[in-house]
Image (cartoon, rainbow, N blue to C red):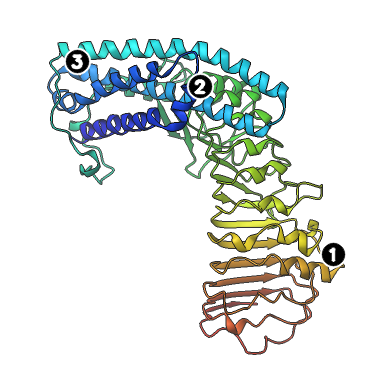
Amino acid sequence: MAATLVGGAFLNSTLNVLFDRLASKEFINFFRGRKHDESLLKKLKLKLLGLNKVLNDAEDKQITDPAVKKWLHELKGAVYDAEDLVDEIATEALRCKVEAEYQSGSNQVQSLISSFTKLFDDEIESKLEKMIDTLEDFLKEKDELGLREVAGRNWSQTRLPTTSLVDESDVYGRENEKEELMKLLEDDKPCGTFENVRHFSCVQRNFDGVDKLRLIKDAKCLRTFLQINHGLLSEMLWLSNKVLDEIILGMPRLRLLSLSQYEFEELPCSIGKLIHLRFLDLSYSRITQLPESVCTLYNLETLLLSKCRSLRTLPADLGKLISLRLLEISGDHPFGTDLKEMPVSISRLKDLQQLTEFVVGKCSGSGINGLKELNSLCGEITISGLENVTSGNDASEAKLKEKKHLKSLFLRWRSTTEDSQKERDVLENLEPHTNLEMLGITNYGGTRFPNWLGDKSFCNMVSLTLVNFENCFSLPPLGQMSSLETLMIRDFPEIETFPEGGLPSGLTRLYI
């Protein structure tokens, strides 16, 4: 019964998400006062509620009744379509909100937004009416099938199998689709299209070619495209901008797109067409920059740019990605990414939870004050380019002391300066919250440590790394850091003894 339970849980959870979204204040407000008022939303919700009532009965009867199984399978597709439509409307509402806030005061921009919204209104009304008619057909068919409302099953308490092994006796439907998909991936010639395939993942092999990749784009309903590297590839597959453009345009409903196992130098502007996208992985690519159209992916929550060794800049309007929660940036060398600076607009991403690296730029407006409002940051962050911080007051704008969710902080100067007093003032004003557990400082050019480093208030710190301190004559009072377990001290040419008061009593690992 495993497949039945999973299928029922999917439909139930998807419908509940749809109901919540249709009832949300933001969603209703978007429709209020428009050409198509709330009546269409009400009709859509009533149709979905009517189908939801017979869902339990259909899930039970599909095992023995082929007609019910076919009806339920087709209903799942319709629910997917309804979810896409509702997401499209919600995305437009989000777009209007972002653009209005981002370009406030610009009459020309407001006029363009209004014109675009009118075109959207005309198109969405037609789609809503078509969807309502489709769901009405399902309601008529459920009466013919004798489906009725039965006592609800609590899917949240239903115990699903914990093993990853599949009991094939409990797998129903899609046998032909699975066989065709496997044949497509194994053969050199296409054997058909897969318009209803929604999730695709596979382990990339050395002999996989671009032609096979092109075939997948025929899955117009695809939501997940995930290539998995088993670690044995001798070389990565090269993709041209033309091939990437074909793939992107052929899969408009994608929620997750992973291109981390491919090499390409340019991401097509068509990426902005993927309005439903939540997850984008471009790690290990050779891109030097991202197209500005990326900034129209208003639903994007995760952007992975790890090991993009040629990446030099991020889009100026990155701040439009207000749904972004994770931005992963890292490079191939000890000094982190090759980015020169962060865009000024990054300060708008107030709900950003993970930012692996923040690069302080030389230009006005790309300074460390971009971190000021990012108080939801958690986990680990590296702040590099600290040689570009102009003063202690400038450093204080980062408000690191207010970022209580950060656990690991790494401060890096990419080069040392001759102004040791400025360096000390900068580090003094980069005092983190006392919740910090790991701290690393590299290439600091001051002669003395700030007063906060070594203070007993940092009772949660378990690891401290200090590397390349050419001008320091003494170490901070480490003995007061009672919780410190790991200490690394390297490249301190002017220091000959440990600090007065000795080392922490709980220290278990010391690297010199």
Instruction: Specify the quadrant of the image occupied by residue 375.
Output: bottom right
Q: Are marks 3 and 2 in contact (CB under 8 Å)?
A: no
Q: Which mark is residue 417?
A: 1
Instruction: Specify the quadrant of the image occupied by residue 135.
Output: top left
Q: Which residue lies at the image location 63% right of the left edge and 90% below the top edge?
A: 501
- Badge 3 crowding class, 10 Å Cα cut-off, few under 14, some 14 to 19, many 20 or more, is many
Q: Which residue lies at the image location 67% right of the left edge and 71% below the top edge?
A: 466
Residue indicated by mark 2:
252
Q: Secondary structure at mark 2?
A: loop
List the single residue furthest toward the front.
33
- Badge 1 crowding class, 10 Å Cα cut-off, few under 14, some 14 to 19, many 20 or more, is some
Can residue 47 be seen?
yes
Q: Secondary structure at mark 3?
A: helix
> Residue 398 versus residue 221: which sits nearer the camera?
398
Q: Is residue 197 left or right of residue 323?
A: left
**Residue 149 vertical placement versus 391 (above, below):** above
